[in-house]
Amino acid sequence: MIITTLCTRQISVRRLIDCRHLSYYNTNRPILSSSLFCNKNNTSEGLHIPNRSVSSVTTITLPSWFVTLSNSTPVAYAQQFIISFHEMTGTSWWATIMLSAITLRLVVTLPLTIYQHYINSKLENLSIEFEPTVKEIQKEVAKAIKLHKWPEGKAKRVYTKAIKKYWNELIVKENCHPAKATIVVWIQLPMWVCMSIAIRNITLMLPPSEEAVTRFHELTEGGVFWFSNLTAVDPTYCLPIILCLSNLLIIEIQSQSRNKSPTRNQKILTNIVRGFSIVMMPLSCFLPSGVCLYWTASSIYGLSQNLFLLSPQVRKFIGIPKTPYNHEHPYKFLIDKTKSRLRIS
């Protein structure tokens, strides 16, 4: 992604903002005149060019939907949340980004994830209880075929309709409709998108202002370890690799921790998510380190959360019903299954 050239003198910053050279939304960015970086005596002002920054001659076109999203109210609230969090905690920017990701996951998505596990466990238990009813319906349909000589098509329609009717009555009675288990996705995904774009806006000094330039100064030195500049891409690509590995580990833990064969649709969905996780790695290689750090912190937290919620003691404490598909020793089961797949004795 494009990293705007940083000018240290406030007067030069004002001139850049007035000319909208700092605006990421210009479809054609003009060449930054060298006179902007010189004082009246034609001596060069001090410049700090971030590592791996792009040339000052850049042409960029953004789709209108992305511009609209970047300027949207939810993204503005997310951006203000990050800035306020940084000012309130007084931490470095790398810590602010990581802590804000963990805080949102703890406060917002953890309760929703627990509720998702609660609904899924109830559905699994209900499906087991529903099996005798299915057998009874099968017997009734078989009798009707013999007595009334129903054709195969009609018998199948009656059977399917009866199954749906009794199942819907059961899940309504137990208040565990499968749609309720998807609420975490509908909350977490928009939040993740808004936070990602908000951090990206901050690293690009958007919306343009003197405060935005000051934050940009801080971000260029607000990293840690190998990603000291949060406005530039990760020069070592370690963050994208860690992100990809943690996402794949989450998928494997979710798919391997169950003592139940996945359905065809579940296998397809798992492979789609695997592919998306792999695609995110090259994509994150071109994003500012601040955005990639947020993704990585959120993903590592998700991995820890999945392992935490595997514990039978934790599930019992927070009221998640026990099912026959849960293991008494899930961590040992995961290790043994991993060794078996890798053919390690």
Image (spheres, grey):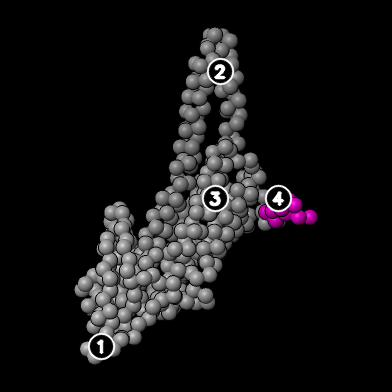
Determine which residue is flagged by label 1.
42
Kind of residue sitting beneath label 3: Arg
* Callout 2 amino acid: Val
- What secondary structure predominates along the stretch shown in magenta? helix
Could you tell me the amino acid type at mark 4? Arg
Gap in angstroms between the C-alphas marked 3 and 2: 42 Å
Secondary element under disc 1, as helix, strand or loop, is: loop
In the displayed structure, 308 sits above or below 126; it is: below
Above or below, 287 relative to 267: below
Which percent across, then down, holds residue 299? 51, 61
| Residue 343: percent from left, percent from top | 75, 52
Q: Earlier in the sequence, mark 1 or mark 2?
A: 1
Image height of 253 relative to 75, above or below: above
Disc 2 is placed on an element classified as helix
Question: Real-space Cα distance between discs 4 and 1?
Answer: 68 Å
Q: Magenta segment range?
A: 334-345
State the separation of the CA atoms marked 1 and 2.
93 Å
93 with respect to 75 (left or right): right
Give the secondary structure at mark 4: helix
* 10 Å crowding of disc 1: few (<14), some (14-19), many (20+): few
**Total of numbered circles in the picture?**
4
The one nearer the camera, 77 or 213, is: 213
On the image, numbered disc 2 is attached to which residue?
A: 141
Instruction: Tell me the residue at 55%/63% (across/down).
Output: 241
Residue on which the image places disc 4: 341
Q: Do the residues labelled 3 and 2 touch (CB within 8 Å)?
A: no
Single out the residue that lies furthest toward the bottom.
41
Q: CA gap, disc 3 to disc 4? A: 17 Å
